Amino acid sequence: MNNFTFVFSTFLLFVVAAIAEIGGGYLVWLWLREKRKIAFGLIGGFILFLYGIIPTFQPSNFGRVYAAYGGIFVVMAIIWGFLIDKKRPDRYEIIGGSIVFLGALIIFYSPR
């Protein structure tokens, strides 16, 4: 696997995991906080279960995968808030998101 393929495929797994975690959590949120039907919570719970599986496809150890994923998650949550909740990120969210994103890239993609 060449370097581009490695970075693309692993980053895609991080994004898919983030969408699953945030989306599943959002459905549970809607069920409990917005008084939606229990189906929202059940579907959200199932998606969260799938989220737990997705990182196992990453070609690194658990700690490194989850440490890097944390940074990707933060950025994806800000993007989710912008696209779904229609909440424009402020400068501190952008600065903080940039810092953790850079940290995630360093943790996962630095040569060892």
Image (cartoon, helix red, strand yellow):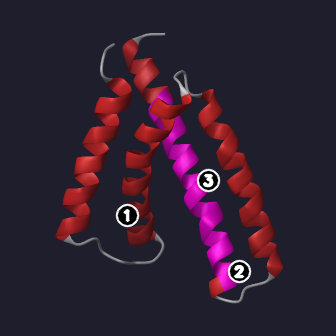
Q: CA distance from mark 1 to mark 2?
A: 21 Å
Q: Is residue 98 above or below residue 62?
A: below
Q: Tell me the amino acid under the disc marked 3.
A: Ala
Disc 1 element: helix
Q: Residue at x 69, y 39 (%)?
A: 53
Q: What is the quadrant of residue 101 in the picture?
A: top left
Disc 3 element: helix
Q: Earlier in the sequence, mark 1 or mark 2?
A: 2
Image x and y of residue 76, in percent: 42, 55
Q: Tell me the amino acid under the disc marked 1.
A: Ile
- The numbered dot on residue 31 is 2
Q: Residue at x 31, y 15 (%)?
A: 111
Q: What is the quadrant of residue 4 in the picture?
A: top left
Query: Badge 3: how crowded within 10 Å, few (<14), some, or many (20+)?
Result: many
Image x and y of residue 35, in percent: 70, 89
Q: Is residue 51 above or below residue 44?
A: above
Q: Residue at x 65, y 80 (%)?
A: 30
| 4 sits left or right of 61 in the view | left
Q: Earlier in the sequence, mark 2 or mark 3?
A: 3
Q: Which residue is mark 1?
A: 78
Q: CA distance from mark 2 to mark 3?
A: 16 Å
Disc 2 element: helix
Q: What is the quadrant of residue 6 in the picture?
A: top left
The stretch in magenta equals 10-32
Q: Spot the residue most to the bottom.
A: 35
Q: Which residue is mark 3?
A: 20
Q: Tell me the amino acid under the disc marked 2.
A: Trp
Q: Is residue 93 magenta?
A: no
